[in-house]
């Protein structure tokens, strides 16, 4: 376990909507932070009134304009994988370690459960914790040589049509070489850590996070030979859609949806951005597979 400088400023992000599960998880965290004299900020003041006692709520500071406060040492995510992914986007360029507590359902990439996190969090606040780095992947929407927008994913990007009754033709290029002309409902481009998400449901393989790769998983392909493909993450993947008479979208990590228009191209590549997660030393990748998916 690495000795880091003690944590003095914390931001807490909550899973949207839910109240009851947070009543058990949030108050002990606030008590611990106050006990350790750690400054913290939160979002959603209106919802916290339903979660916290008046005494705890009275002295809470709140994030202004939904921006992570500068100089924070730690982000605590209370929710499922979706909350954690949203927290990664909140951090932006800041390299703040994330302490993920699963208050959701599956919680595959959240490291800690509600039953065992407080003691580890207390140790982490003293600076004794180990992180691991997860890369972010870039999705660029382009028209000719102009980049119209750029988005980043941790798990996956999905290109599909919104009209469920029709297939469409998608050209797939890797480093400017055409590898497939896919006819179907769309395609999932997954990172290794996202290979246990939507890609898995669509028949894709499980890829260990240490393997530097993408997984291209077709969605309902109209072919007997179209199969998921694993390629190195050092390449650039490009997609062009031949038919534009009905809506096509790219969805990033299930949270950002971008409509595609005529003559636009999507390019996906590994970026130089990354996020840091605080590691739970009591579990491994394969123990998580066994626990979450009854694997093996």
Image: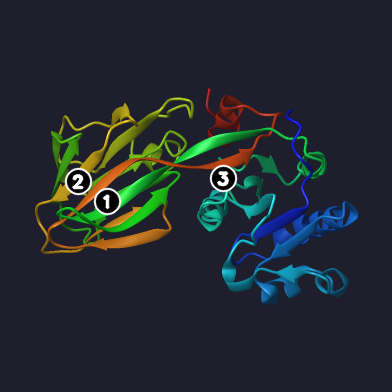
Q: Disc 2 marks which residue?
A: 239
Q: Earlier in the sequence, mark 1 or mark 3?
A: 3
> Which residue extends farthest bottom?
46
In the foreground, 154 or 248: 154
Q: Residue at x 45, y 44 (%)?
A: 154
Residue depicted at 73% across the width and 47% down the height: 114
Measured as percent of width and height from the top left, residue 238 is found at 21, 43
- Helix, strand or loop at label 3? It is loop
Check the image and name the residue furthest to the top. 296
Q: Earlier in the sequence, mark 1 or mark 2?
A: 1
Residue 54 position by quadrant: bottom right
Is 139 situated left or right of 181 in this image?
right
Q: Are marks 1 and 2 in contact (CB under 8 Å)?
A: yes
* Label number found at residue 159: 1
Alpha carbon separation for disc pair 2 and 3: 31 Å
Q: How far across and down, in percent of the image, does residue 276 sit?
A: 58, 41
Disc 1 element: strand
Q: Earlier in the sequence, mark 2 or mark 3?
A: 3
| Rendered view: 70 above or below 290 | below
Q: Position of residue 197 (x, y in %)?
A: 44, 42
Task: Give the CA distance from mark 1 to mark 2.
Answer: 9 Å
Report the residue that reaches farthest toward the right.
35
**Quadrant assignment, res 251:** bottom left
Q: Nearer the viewer, mark 2 or mark 3?
A: 2
Residue matched to label 3:
106
Left or right: where 246 falls relative to 252: left
Position of 254 relative to 50 (above/below): above
């Amino acid at each position: 376990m690495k000795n880091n400088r003690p944590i003095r400023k914390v931001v807490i992000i909550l899973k949207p909507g839910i109240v009851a599960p947070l009543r058990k998880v949030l108050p002990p965290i606030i008590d611990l932070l106050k006990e350790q004299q750690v400054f913290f900020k939160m979002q959603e003041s209106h919802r916290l009134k339903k979660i916290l006692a008046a005494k705890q709520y009275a002295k809470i500071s709140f994030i202004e304009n939904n921006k992570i406060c500068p100089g924070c040492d730690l982000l605590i995510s209370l929710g499922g994988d979706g909350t954690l992914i949203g927290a990664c986007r909140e951090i932006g360029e800041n390299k703040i370690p994330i302490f993920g507590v699963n208050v959701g359902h599956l919680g595959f990439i959240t490291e800690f459960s509600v039953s065992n996190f407080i003691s580890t969090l207390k140790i982490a606040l003293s600076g004794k914790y180990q992180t691991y780095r997860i890369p972010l992947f870039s999705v660029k929407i382009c028209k000719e040589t102009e980049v119209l927008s750029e988005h980043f994913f941790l798990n996956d990007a999905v290109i599909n049509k919104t009209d469920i009754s029709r297939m469409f033709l998608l050209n797939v290029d890797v480093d400017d070489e055409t590898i497939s002309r896919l006819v179907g409902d769309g395609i999932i481009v997954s990172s290794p850590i996202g290979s246990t998400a939507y890609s898995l449901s669509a028949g894709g393989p499980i890829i260990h996070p240490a393997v530097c790769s993408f997984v291209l998983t077709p969605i309902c392909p109209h072919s007997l030979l179209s199969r998921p493909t694993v390629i190195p993450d050092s390449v650039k993947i490009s997609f062009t859609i031949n038919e534009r008479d009905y809506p096509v979208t790219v969805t990033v990590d299930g949270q950002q949806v971008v409509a595609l228009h005529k003559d636009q191209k999507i390019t996906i590549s590994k970026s130089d951005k990354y996020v840091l997660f605080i590691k739970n030393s009591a579990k491994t990748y394969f123990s998580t597979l066994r626990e979450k998916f009854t694997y093996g």
